[in-house]
Amino acid sequence: MKLEREMMRGAGPTALLQLLSAGEKYGYEIIEALTQQSAGVFELGQSTLYPMLYNLEAKKLVTSQKKEGPNGRSRRYYRLTAKGKKKLAADREQWAAVIKGLGALGVTRLLDIAPNVALPGLALEGGTQ
Amino acid sequence: MSDSTSTPFFSPSFPAFKTLITFLRPSFWLGGNWKKAIKESGLPTDVQATIHQVVQRSRLMRREKFDVAEELIQHFQDGNQQGRSFEALTETFGDPESAALLIRRSKIRNRSVWISAARMIPPMMLCFSIVYLGLFLWYHSGKASPTIDYMAELNRNSNEAEEEEKAWPLYRTVWAKYQLGGMGEYADMRQQMFVEDKGTAGSRLVRPSDQQWPQAVEVLKQHQELLGVFRKGANRKSFGLVLTSDVRQYSDEDFAALFPYSKKETHEYGCGPEDPSGILDGATIGVLLPHVSEVRNVARLFHVDTRHAVVEGDSERATTNIETVLGLANQITDNKILVSSLVAVAISSIGFDQLEDVIRSNPDFLSPAQLDRLQSKIKQLDIHSWLDYSGEKACFKDMVQRCYTDDGNGDGRLTAVGMRLLKSDFLTGVTGLSNPSVPYSPPAISFSEVFAGIESALMNSEIIAPTSVLMCAGRKETLAKAEEFFSEVESDSKLPFWESRNSKTDGWQHHDDFFSENQAKFILLSKMFPAVSAVNVAIARAKARQDAVIVALAMHRYHRQHNQWPETTEELVGNYLKEVPVDIINGKPLHFKVVDDAPLIYSVGMDHDDDGGVDAKRKGKPAKRSSIVPGPKDDDFEGDWILWSQAMPLNSSK
């Protein structure tokens, strides 16, 4: 399942921040990781990734640096800034609240939204419904 | 986020400093060659085309394009290395056009404020250049087209006078012979009329007690013809010299009289290098008044001759001389130019001084009939009418029609030629009357001389001159403002002095403030509007003196008849005065006292109270009478303003 554009616009940056919280990554690596780890939910049009990264960079949430990769080729690597880490923490809380709210409304169950996605810090009260 | 408020500018982490460093790097301007990078990437042609399309359409800065191209090349290389075909990668990449748009937006957001601002400079420069070019063409295309002969307005009185009412045809006959306005034997001779005054360290007219007196008498003898002609001419209604700003307009006889050492063909005319366009040819602002100061010199000659008449016991000649001088004062104002009015004030003062001289030296020298004659003559002097701004108004309107375009509906804009004239010192030089508070003075700040230089250069720069179209008021607005100011001045001039603005503490300050604040907008008005305060005061002083002289003559006539002085000025009303003249300071009757059998007539002076006829002091020191400027109460002064000082020793009165 792929997210609609508006949903991606809201969730995509948080997903990117989350992904980079594990360590620095280069463009294609991020695309691959997003697709695999979100079971295709966050499968970005590849051309969308870079504008999203540049926007996060403009907001000083990520920073980039050109350096040589293990295969000897030079690439641009992105990593979270301190501000990015704070933002990610805030986003996590907000998404948890959204999911909790949606769950409470009976819109959907957590597992229906993203059965394979690990959502750290999310603790639903009263378990799944 | 860096804290720019606490980071010193020269710190490498200061954003502006970082941007500056970025700007200084050649790579910022040259960037990288993104096209070459794509070509040398080794990627298939289709992929290269996609990347090329995205980068090209992003319309970013060269440096940014290179970064995007590099990143997309890496993207495709990494994808292929991960086992995906280039076809598949191209397919999943998305629409290049949308990608270009999104990349452009996000990259622009990524720019620092400093770079964004720097990026705005070229378009702004372009806009500015276009606007400036428009203004430049608009400004330089404006041409003035003067249509009204304002010189004719200045000459109205002369032109309307009958030939036998004009004095100039008489004066002209002796003007050249006696080198009035020139150099030579007679002009040198007249220097004998002056001696150095040890008391004031200046020069004064010679007196019979001076060692130089015999030489002066000899000079007077040499000038008998001139004095005779002026005695005759001064009775005429009009001075009668037709004014012009172009010497070529003078008749040959007039030119020969006024400029005896010059040839008409080679004499400079117009405004010379100040006005290469010739727009001021015939302008009232350049009106020639070569006769005015010479008439004052003739009045001085009469003063000495009057002293001689007293020595010779010729009271009739003394009386006629005084009448002549007062007649000259009146004649000189027939052109309604304020400069002439101010000279008339000076000439009338010479007349009053003569009279005071005569009576001081011998109170019974003049007969009652002569005293009566002189009193009538002085009363006839309509000094208040000399305060006439019509000439200045005509000069102003004339300059407007020469400096502004005319759209046919009374409006127009300042022309380049007009602006050049206004920025030169020409106006002040010509009129000598422009408002002293107006000349441009840069603010007194640190490095003031440097700033003054820069500001002055900008003010006078030809480069910024076209912006005057935006800054300066148009023709209609300028004329309307001038009309408002002149009307205010004219209606104020109809008030008695003690009710006029000059008697108020703030006086004409609102005009000065207006001109200071609107110097650029109303540049012509601020340069040409007369120094109202100074002119009004000069006329008021002359009027005060006239009134005092009239009272003095009335008192002497009373004394001759009753062999005693009147107790009050009211006793003079009827036979000796029509009404008691009032003090211009407060509108109450002039004060007098009798000292050593001589009257002393005075105004309450600057402290506005009657001190019993004590000469004025300023901050405890004797004040020159010429330093008394009638106006609001001034606590620096004490004592009174002596207007008829017959009762005082000669040295303290002059």
Image (spheres, grey):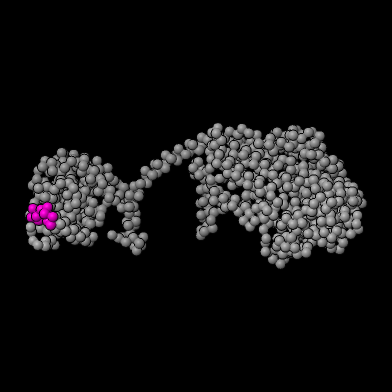
Q: Is residue A16 magenta?
A: no
Q: Is residue B84 visible?
A: yes
Which residue: 75% across, 51% down? Answer: B543
- The image position of residue B137, as x and y in percent, is 48, 36
Viewer-side residue, B501 vs B469 = B501
Number of marks drawn: 0
Q: Quadrant of residue B586?
A: bottom right
- The image position of residue B336, as x and y in percent, is 70, 42
Location of residue A43 with respect to B632 vertically, above or below: above
Viewer-side residue, B588 vs B55 = B588
* Image quarter hosting the C terminus of chain B: bottom right
Name the main secondary structure of what is drawn in magenta. Answer: helix
Which residue: 19% across, 53% down? Answer: A13
- The image position of residue B306, as x and y in percent, is 86, 50
Q: Is residue B50 left or right of residue A112?
A: right
Residue segment shown in magenta: A103-112
Q: Residue furthest bottom?
A: B620
- The image position of residue B557, as x and y in percent, is 87, 53
Q: Is residue B165 left or right of residue A77?
A: right
Q: Is residue B364 left or right of residue B60?
A: right
Q: Is residue B460 visible?
A: no
* Image quarter hosting the N terminus of chain B: bottom left
Which residue: 57% across, 42% down? Answer: B480
Q: Is residue B29 left or right of residue B624?
A: left
